[in-house]
Amino acid sequence: MKNLIYLFSFLIFISCEKENIQSGIQTKVSGKLTNYDGEPIVSSKVRIGEFKNKFVSDGGSTDYFSKYVDSTLTNINGEYDITFKTTGEGSSYRLILENSPNDQSYYGFYDSVEIKNLGNPFVFNYNQFTKLYPCDVTINMNNILIFPIQIYHETTRRIFNPEIAANTIFVKRIYITKFGIQKFTLQRTKPNGTIQQAVFNFPASNSILLTTQNINLNDSDFVDI
């Protein structure tokens, strides 16, 4: 009896899964990527991801990433155009945009978008990326007593290992918006476990070129948090 119940439950779970889409369906996907001001996002990676639908323990089903089936880059106008074919091995296909490239020239908060009505043109435009520009911050350490020190900046990719380990001149490249005030935070932990921060604010650079900032860091700049 128990075996029949397990078999019946298994068949219900399987029936919840979406079937794979037949192979050879050709779909054209296009659009334009810009920042909030309408400036194009150039050479951004655009991918087509294949997903498989599988049942989960709560009785429902969900989509799991399987592989990329095609990709392209945006042109100088931020436009992309890609045509892909279904493989017969996926239950859905999604458009996946690069949120933050290695050069950190922009960032965005974006979830993949399911490509529906396969076989028909699919257009997706996105205008909420933020363009970033390099800034070199020179930190002059004045007899700092406690190390190591970690650096935090909102729009710069975080390095999880502490970066500053001794009294020296340290240069950190961050990636900033050109119109916003920049908050630059140095953090350390005292031997008793107390976390301290030294916070510096830089004015808007209003520049797309490499800019610089200088900090004279003293032990008294750190406060308990």
Image (spheres, grey):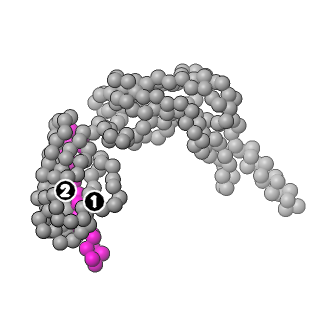
Tag 2: amino acid:
Phe
Quadrant location of the N terminus in the rendered image: bottom right
**Position above or below: 204 against 187:** above
Observer-nearest of 98 and 92: 98
Judge whether 43 appears above or below 143 on screen.
above
Task: Give how far across and how far down residue 17 sits, in percent.
Answer: 70, 43
The quadrant of the rendering that contains the C terminus is bottom left
* Residue 103 image-quadrant placement: top left
Q: Is residue 134 left or right of residue 75?
A: left
Q: Which residue is mark 2?
A: 170
Image marks 1 and 2: residues in contact by CB distance under 8 Å: yes
View extreme (bottom): residue? 192
Residue 40 is situated, as x and y percent measured from the top left of the image, at: 32, 27
* Residue pictured at 36% horizontal, 42% vertical: 102
Q: Is residue 34 visible?
A: no
Q: What's the residue at 48%, 36% (across, down)?
A: 96
Query: In what element is the residue under mark 2?
Result: strand
Check residue 178 for magenta coloring. yes
Which span of residues is magenta-colored? Answer: 176-197
Mark number, residue 163: 1
Q: Residue at x 56, y 26 (%)?
A: 84
Kind of residue sitting beneath label 1:
Glu
Residue 5 visible to the viewer:
yes
